[in-house]
Each structure stands twice: as structure tokens, then as C-alpha cells.
Amino acid sequence: MIASLSLQQLQQRFGGELVNGSVCFDAVCTDTRKLDAGALFVALRGENFDAHDFLPAVDGKVLGVVTEQRLENSTMPQWIVADTSIALGQIGRLCREQFNGPVIGITGSCGKTTVKEMMAAIFAQRHRVCVTRGNLNNHFGVPMTLFSLSPEHEVLIVEMGASGPNEIGYLCGIARPGITAVNNVMPAHVEGFGSVDGIATAKGQIYTTLDPGGVAVLNADDNYADYWRGEMPEGVRALEVGFGHQCAIHPDNIQMDALGCAAFDLVVEGVSHPVKLQVLGEHNVHNALVAAGCAHAAGIPVAEIASGLSAASGVGGRMQSLSGRNGATVIDDSYNANPGSVSAAIELLAQRNGKKVLVLGDMAELGPEADSAHRDMGRLARERGIDQLFTLGTLSGAASVEFAAGRQHGQRNFSEREPLIEALASELDESTTVLVKGSRSARMELVVQALTNGNQEKV
């Protein structure tokens, strides 16, 4: 934290009840396995846990607790609230109010973590940056990012995820970003939003909650760009990025190398500077444009933006090219999947030389569109010349059916991981590239580990 807070401050600002007086704290913990004697403990409830069950074990091991029920027979200071998860966000909001530097918020259906890391690489050249760690981007994770702010930080970058309506608006109310971007809208977590239109509305809250003077970095190539333009609050400046030369920030002279990394000229308000990305796939050019837009809005010069983008390395599980068994190349894109990101993966794989093998696990949370979405991926893989498709799971079987149509070999759909890995092992040689993709629930990283013998050496 930038400065300590007290339970009395929290109670006076947000209500609730104080028991056993107040206490000052400069750290927050939520895990009973990682207690800190100098921290405030917040007893959270989740779908599969309730930290209130462990409060007696916490007594005396932290400075105080935030709880929904009084801890009896204890002298430890307690802030009693109706909902501890909301209280966690309220503490985070007070931490945010201690910070005076630029705050950037990023959301989107896919690629937001890559954009976040690109931005961090840009700003870190000159500034001390506080950035979301890993994927701590929900109503628990965003406050934890705010708790990690310290006096030396000069820039705050917050990734925001959502699985349902109003979550982005809630997170923006805590983090209060002044520069925001929606990377894209694609069919992801559709079950929680009801439709892709619902996703666009929910993600767009990162724009509609901006205060006057804020900057909305707008993906002009997204299908919902016109909708967001119409929803922009008065006094908010829209900064458009995209592949069209009418955009304030756009690329020129895109060239792809043999590995699938892009080089291009980054054009920002008419000023051009060369960029050479270290991450795979042409879709990462667009991620770079969004990161560049946020950095430009914060006043970073074009040359500095370009050098930061060129220095940004990939994120684990997202388009990482690894050394596989028998000299094969394994592209690890296993972190998550939706139709948009799978399409981008297929396009990357299609550009490789030699034998091209796609391994696809189920794409989750697509609602009634799940069958057709998987069929679309199988059809796209066939049309783009992918040599073989191996699938894991019930839903991805539809992709296998579509891919096998009119081909000599039949479907290669597996219900268990081990038989899939055994079948794949016989396909590996120096001329083969295997790309592994799937939603988190499919645990496709285990397939990557097996095909690389756990070797994370990049190629």
C-alpha cells in the first residue's frame, strides 16, 4: 500500500460495525495458509470455500479481520460487514485513491493479458509500473492489484475480466481508470452474458464509466465500434486504433517472418517508427495497436512505444513456440480458447511450413452456440490446409466431424487425455508443428507438457 489505512476509516466511509476498536494496517491477506502478522485478514466466501470457517485459527495471527459474523471470545479488532467481497473492493478503492499517476484499464474477450504485458513493457522503460499479476482480473483479483501499489509506483495497469453483466462497471468503480480499452468482443463466456451483444454492452462499461477528460482507446476494427462511439460519455476523448489508415494509430508495411512474428511500421498521429514483435501471430499486431493507443494517451513518445513493443516477450500458455519430442515444434496456446482466438491460432498454424497439426480441447461457456462454433473451427482448419486435427472432449468432437468431411482419414476425437497423447506422439518429427489450444477446463497445458517432456525451451 502507498499508506496505511485503519478500520475506523473503512467503517466511517462504508458503514458496518467495529468490534474491539480500530487498527491501522498496510497489507491485506485472504488466504489462511499465508497469514501475515502485520496484515488485515478478509474472510471471503466463494462457490467452494468459506474463510469464516477458519476464523478461530486466524485469531491472534493478524492485526484484525473483516468478517460477516462476529468472532466471539476474541480481543482482535473486527470490521463486521454485510458482504466481505464488497468490503475487499472498498479497501481496494481507498488504496486507489492514494495513487495520483495514470491508471489504465483493459478488458476484452481475448488478448487482454497480452495487451497488458505489452503496455507494461512500454512503460517499464522509464517508469515504475504496478500491473495486474497473472490473471487476477476479477472482483477478488483487482483489489489485490490495488493493494500492491507502493509509493514508488508511477503507472497502474489493471486488467479486468468478467463472466456476466455489470462486473466491468463494478471493477471500474474500484480502480477508476482514466484510460481504457476494449481489446475485442468475441463469443466467450456467452452463457454469462446471454449473447454477444450482451458481452459488448458489458465490456463497454469500461468506456461508459469514464469521467470527463478520460481517454477511450477504441478498436475501430471491432464489429461494435459504432455502438461504443454512440455510448461514449460527454467529455471523453475517443482514440481510434486499427488496421485502417484513417485510424490515429495504425500499422503499415506488415511483414511476417518464418516463425510467424510480425514486423511493421507503427504510425501514431502521422509519426512512424519500426516495430519487430517477439510474439507469434498477425493478430498480435492488433494487440500491439491497443497497447500503443493506451501508451500514447498517457504521453509516451512513439519511439519509446515502438521499442517497448519490440522488447515485449510472450505470456506463458499464449502462442509460445517450444521444442517438442523428436525435434517437433509445439506451439503452446493452451491457456484459454474461444472461437476468435482459435481462428487466430489456425491462421498462424496455416502459415507454417511442413506438417501442421492442430490439437483442440473443448471451448467452454459458449451456450447454445457451442456445437456450431466447434463445427466452424473444424471447417476453418480444413479450409486453411491444416493436415491433422486431434480433439479432446465431447464438444470438440463436432470439430472433428466437420474437419474429417471429405478427407481420407476419419475423426480423431478422444475422451481421455492419455490416448490422445499416445496418438500424437507418433506424429512428431522435425518437419511437424503442433499447436495446442483449449479452454481452461480442458487442461490442455498437460498435453503440452507431455509433448515437450516438460521442456519450456523456446524456439
Image (tube, rainbow, N blue to C red):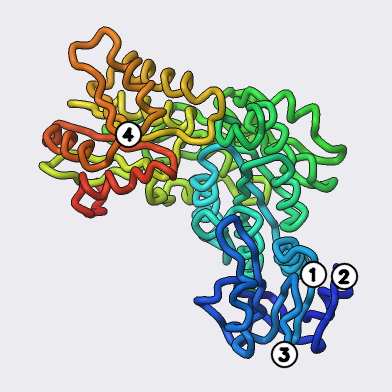
Q: Residue 90 versus residue 244: which sits nearer the camera?
A: 90
Label 3 crowd (10 A; few <14 / some 14-19 / many >=20):
few
Please tell me whether residue 250 is drawn above or below residue 88 in the rendered image. above
- Quarter of the image for the N terminus: give it: bottom right
Local SS, label 1: loop
Closer to viewer: mark 4 or mark 3: 3
Closer to viewer: mark 2 or mark 3: 3
Label 1 crowd (10 A; few <14 / some 14-19 / many >=20):
many
Q: What residue type is labelled 3?
A: Asn
Task: Pick whichever of labels 3 and 1 is earlier in the sequence.
Answer: 3
Task: Pick whichever of labels 1 and 4 is earlier in the sequence.
Answer: 1
Q: Distance between the residues labelled 1 and 2?
A: 8 Å
Q: Distance between the residues labelled 4 and 3?
A: 53 Å
Local SS, label 3: loop
Label 4 crowd (10 A; few <14 / some 14-19 / many >=20):
many
Task: Pick whichever of labels 1 and 2 is earlier in the sequence.
Answer: 2
Q: Please say whether residue 311 is visible from this viewpoint.
A: yes
Residue at which label 2 appears: 15
Residue at which label 1 appears: 81
- x and y percentages locating residue 362 in the rendered image: 41, 33
Q: In which quarter of the image is residue 76?
A: bottom right
Instruction: Give the residue at x 55% y 76%.
Output: 32
Q: Distance between the residues labelled 2 and 3?
A: 23 Å
Judge left or right: residue 22 versus residue 35.
Answer: right
- x and y percentages locating residue 428 in the rendered image: 14, 36
Q: What residue type is labelled 1?
A: Val
Q: In which quarter of the image is residue 426?
A: top left
Query: Do the numbered discs 1 and 4 sit on residues whose CB atoms are within 8 Å?
Result: no
Residue at which label 4 appears: 392
Local SS, label 2: loop
Q: Residue 75 versus residue 157: which sits nearer the camera?
A: 75
